[in-house]
Image (cartoon, rainbow, N blue to C red):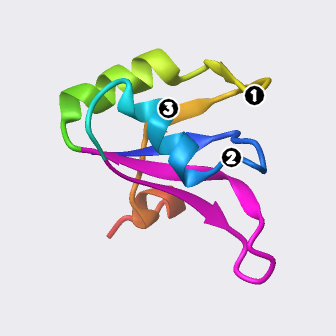
């Protein structure tokens, strides 16, 4: 299952993100989205977890948790079509 993780600090690394989630299960990948030109973090990313049960547990335990003085937003990632409200 892929998770959306928002409200990250600008200086958080993908390794730190992966480590944060690995406490709750096997992490397949962790990606922080960056600006195409500046390569600066856009303060959100995605984490893919091996097991849906572990991913659900991570959402429950990490959503709203304070990390580096910021409240994380963790939820199941939606497809691009779902985010844009397209009916097809």
What is the number of the mark on residue 68?
Answer: 1
Q: Is residue 43 above or below residue 23?
A: below
Residue at image x 42%, y 47%?
47
On the question of residue 32 being in view, the answer is yes
> Is the C-beta separation of discs 1 and 2 under 8 Å?
yes
Give the mark nearest the N terminus, 3 or 1: 3
Where disc 1 sits, the SS reads loop
Residues 76 and 20: in front is 20
What is the number of the mark on residue 76?
Answer: none
Q: Crowding at label 3, few (<14), some or many (≥20) Cα neighbours within 10 Å?
A: some
Q: Cα distance, mark 1 to mark 2?
A: 9 Å
**39 drawn magenta:** yes
List the single residue furthest toward the bottom: 37
Q: To which residue does mark 3 refer?
A: 20
Q: To which residue does mark 2 refer?
A: 12
Q: Cα distance, mark 3 to mark 2?
A: 11 Å
Report the label total: 3
> Is the C-beta separation of discs 3 and 1 under 8 Å?
no
How far across and down, in percent of the image, does residue 13 sit? 63, 51
Q: Is residue 87 above or below residue 50?
A: below
Where disc 2 sits, the SS reads loop
> Which residues fall within the magenta stretch?
28-49
């Amino acid at each position: 299952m892929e998770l959306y993780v928002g409200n990250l600090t600008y200086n958080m690394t993908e390794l730190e993100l992966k480590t944060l989630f690995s406490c709750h299960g096997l992490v397949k990948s962790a990606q922080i989205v960056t600006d195409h030109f500046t390569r600066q973090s856009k303060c959100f990313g995605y984490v893919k977890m091996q097991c849906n049960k572990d991913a659900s547990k991570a959402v429950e335990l990490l959503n709203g948790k304070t990390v580096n003085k910021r409240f994380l937003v963790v939820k199941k990632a939606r497809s691009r079509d779902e985010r844009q409200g397209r009916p097809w």
